[in-house]
Amino acid sequence: MTRTRLGVHSEVGRLRQAILHRPALELDRLTPDNCDDLLFDDVLWPAKARTEHDAFVQVLRDHGVTVHLFGELLAETLHSAEAKAFVLERVCTVQRLGTALAASVRALAEDMAPATLAELLIGGITRADLSPLHAGGLRWQTLGLDDFVIPPLPNTLFQRDNSAWIYGGVTINPMAMAARRRESIHSRAVYRYHPLFREATFPIYYGDDDVDHQPATLEGGDIHVLGRGAVLIGMGERTTPQGVEILARSLFRAGQASRVIAVELPKSHALMHLDTVLTMVDTDTFLRYPGLAPETLRHWSITPASADEIVEQNNGGLAVEQRDDLFGTIADALGIDRPRVLCVDADGRAAAREQWDDADNVLALEPGVVVGYERNTVTNTMLAENGIKVLPIPSGELGRGRGGARCMSCPIEREGI
Ligand SMILES: NC(=[NH2+])NCCC[C@H](N)C(=O)O
């Protein structure tokens, strides 16, 4: 078993371990009719997407990163009867499946081999998959053979969003979009029961309970662990101020962070997460999409409130101060003069096209070394000219889910800066 010094202490310190998901059955189940609802802009060529993903994994492994594949982690987790019960209790509910199917699907699932069950939980279950089943009830009778009893979770590919390590602990994020909410059940099971995590002690800041968290949502694509106790969180389509408040309180209570910077983003699909427009590429350097004007973004610095402030301001334990220079606030938090911000300024159309294809969504493997899609030649050339090394990966199919190298990875062990 690998070392389990779990914790992510920066955005760009040396990456030691990460979780990725090799796309499986769920991609075969994406069709022109359902892809919009499942948050994909197109259908994919699944075999090619898997080959591209293998290339991504290889780049990380060649760089000394230990890569865990989520499908395998879930299958290994489901070897434990307790873990299986934990997941099935939450997936096979009467509300989701109907009164007749809840019990019969659960009974079938109990008997499945862990690897098959993991594949179907992510890949979805159709009526045809349950063909030996003789069930009654209205739901069963209304289902066509090819209809989903349980829909697939193709966004499992984007491991960044569902759980996010922040310094010594993790948040298991309540997801904004219905199409992704079941992902959290799987992550909760893995962190609770998988041998990699079971023996370790770490705080779980948020989401590891059965409370209805809506609309206090959070997604990891919005969460940047800047380093030195600071966390930057975007509030756009997916992450709400309520979610940020709950996470900030929990981080401060656990003594894991001393400042959260919350930045408001324009609400649009192209900018669904902060990391689609801004990522860190070196200890003092950011990559920014030029269409995002930092001077127009409202942002707040959040710190633990003193006892007096709590009483005077009725602020729920958080001292919240609006600021007016985002990179100045970040510099303060990092104790540096001013970060360097790299941008494709010269060609607005290329910048827009490449942002859509996740040019600004790179994954740092160490300071100044990032993984990015090879297609984004203008951005990658600009980075290289500024001394940032880009390790290119193919993207013809993978990128159609609208996520790049950062979105597709959940670091679980990363050094500080
Ligand atoms: N961190 C990210 N930018 N993730 C991108 C996720 C894309 C995914 N299709 C979604 O809409 O949820």
Image (cartoon, grey):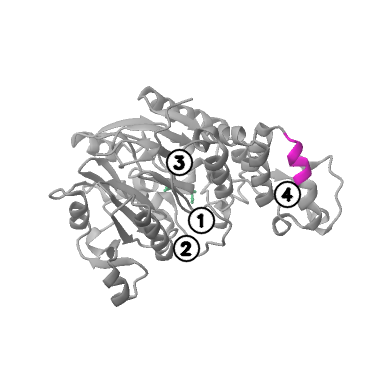
CA–CA distance between discs 1 and 3?
22 Å
Q: Position of residue 380 (x, y in %)?
A: 28, 36
What residue does disc 2 label?
216
Q: Residue at x 63, y 51 (%)?
A: 33
Q: Position of residue 409 (x, y in %)?
A: 43, 39
- Please name which of the two marks, 2 or 4, marks the residue nearer to the observer: 2
Q: Position of residue 7 (x, y in %)?
A: 38, 40
User: Disc 3 residue type?
Assistant: Thr
Q: Is residue 83 left or right of residue 213?
A: right
In reply to whether residue 343 is colored magenta, the answer given is no
- Please name which of the two marks, 2 or 3, marks the residue nearer to the observer: 3
What residue does disc 3 label?
201
CA–CA distance between discs 2 and 3?
26 Å
Q: Residue at x 58, y 43 (%)?
A: 189
The disc placed on residue 147 is 4
Does any portion of residue 195 appear in the rendered image? yes
Check disc 3 and report its element: helix, strand or loop. loop
Some atom of ligand 1 lies within 8 Å of the CB belonging to the residue at label 1: no
Check disc 1 and report its element: helix, strand or loop. loop
CA–CA distance between discs 2 and 4?
31 Å
In the rendered structure, are the residues bearing label 1 and label 2 in contact, judged by CB atoms less than 8 Å apart? yes
Q: Residue at x 54, y 44 (%)?
A: 187
Q: Earlier in the sequence, mark 1 or mark 2?
A: 1
Whether 49 is drawn above or below 309: the answer is above
